[in-house]
Amino acid sequence: MSPDAVSHLVATRPPRSAAQAGHVVFDAREHGLRGDGITNDQPALAELVARLGAGYAADGIGRVIYCPPGNYAIRDAGTVWRSGVSLIGAGRGVTRFLLSNVGNRANPVPLAFFTTVEHGAGRDNHIADCTFANFEIDGSAVALADYHYLAKGLGLQYVLRGCFRDLYIHHTVATGLGCDFLQDTVIDAVVAIGCGREDNGVQWGGAGIGVGIGGWGPVERLTITNCTTVANGTNGIFLELQKPYWQPPTGIRITGCHSEGNRFGISDWGADGLVVSNCTLVGNLEAGFDISAQGTVGVAGRGGILADCLIDGNVHDGIRIGNTPGPYVVRGNRISRNGRHGYRQDELGRGYRAAAHALVVESNDIWGNGLDGILIERAVTDGAVVGNRIRDNGVQCAPAAAGSGETVSYTATTVTDTAAYWEPDGHRGKLLEVQGHDMAVVVGNTATELRLAPVGADALVAFTGPVPAPGTPYRLPAAPPVRAGLAITAPVHAATVRDNRMWDSRQPKTQTHGIWIGERGSCVACRVENNDLADNAVAATWFQTPPVGGNWSGNHDESHQG
């Protein structure tokens, strides 16, 4: 890519004169950067950014640093970024920034940063009109004695009219692209792999793409699109309100993204009206989509829409919602083959404790999940479960099992017992206990082999210690006796459950009931109408706590066990 081509990638203000137009794009090789993988290019980059930023401040004309193909070593310090300065490479894997801190192990070394704590960033002191595009950031050589949330690829705060496009960011200590308070900004076609590699699961950040929100006020116009996030320490993508007293902002969209093998695929930790659509959330270690108060200030998202996504094969739950006041709409998704529940309303972390209001689960295809299709175990008021196909769930149906001795062998991610004869995937989602080792989660099984989830994102093993020796005893628990299409184990008031089909079409059937109200659940003043509950393994319904009031009518096969 030539400098002339680069100029078309950046939307800048029209130059004031033809003479000025010739000084918009600056070839990094002509301004002190070597790109040889040996020379430390950070000082030259920092000097160039400062000089071009001063030029933008003087005349309002954006500048572009074009980095031709090469390996640009960035050692021992990050570069403080300036408004009006864009960084453009020749492509992923072609222009590469190699971060390291061998000369200063205490320094987290992001490629570019500008923050509130270090630089006084704020609404009146922000970064404007910057594009970062067409390059790779490799953070694998940064090593810290203690985790530091600034050990990112990019770490900018208070960005106006920013653009992050066609980037490959991988193996950073903390979040790959960790930029906060993004107004009128686009994150497009960013690939983040193996970021947050030193996050222990409870640290700040550690995601592929992490965006702090709320700093610009009630509206933050941000679009995240066409991004791929794989095997990152916490989230593939997360949004997190940064102050508990800030208003959760609207205006944020995530569309067409792929999140796989992270702890969570996409998390909403404090937005209002987040729109997530047409995303693929697969194989994440806890949940594909997470709405909760697990962020730093304990505020969950609310008012959002999750639509037209594929949410499949996540190790625990497909969708997990907790501590939101509501509302939220989950519509038109395929929610399938997750290890435990397809959709789970739960108590997660700090935050809102009262009943969630106006949660809507509509027109989803929910099938093949390990336990219940939908589990409500936190109080809900005025919710709606409408027009869903909830089928063939309860796959985790196998009885307890144990083994040891000469028929048992182990690899880093499997257990084989040649004496076993297990129902295929009948142990999906169970905790495997191996004598003398930590527990592991089963993601699937054949008649004789268990496949285990990795111990963490980007890990290659299921055990924290050595692989168990051949013959080591193992044990698997029994399946829970009830695995329903819709399970209610918390107070539900004034809900609408209408026009759903809940059944099991397989042999043997594993979805035990269409609707189950457990001993700790209740259904008061609900409208349960026109549902097809036939063809479940045990019965259409089971009311351990009988419903009170409301209207139950027009349901096909209302037989139940009392």
Image: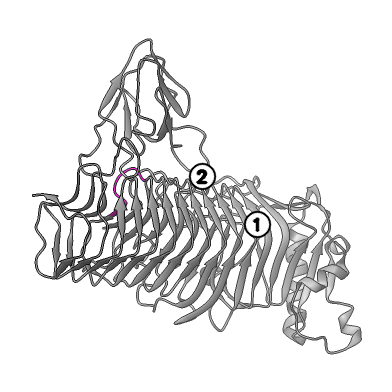
In the displayed structure, 514 sits above or below 275; it is above
Image quadrant of residue 227? bottom right
Question: In the figure, residue 41 lies in which quadrant?
Answer: bottom right
In the rendered view, how is the structure colored? one colour
> Label 2 vs label 1: CA separation?
16 Å
Judge whether residue 482 can be spotted in this image.
yes
Picture coordinates of residue 331, whole percent (x, y): 41, 65
Query: Magenta residues?
Result: 369-374
Mark 2 residue element = loop
Is residue 413 depicted above or below 130 in this figure?
above
Q: Main secondary structure of the magenta part?
A: loop
Q: Is residue 158 left or right of residue 333?
A: right
Read off the residue under disc 1: 77
- Which residue does the image show at 31% across and 71% down from the upper left? 326
Query: Which percent across, then down, holds residue 27?
Result: 85, 65
Amino acid under label 2? Ala
Left or right position of 260 against 111? left
Q: Residue 559: horizontal and vertical position, in percent?
A: 15, 51
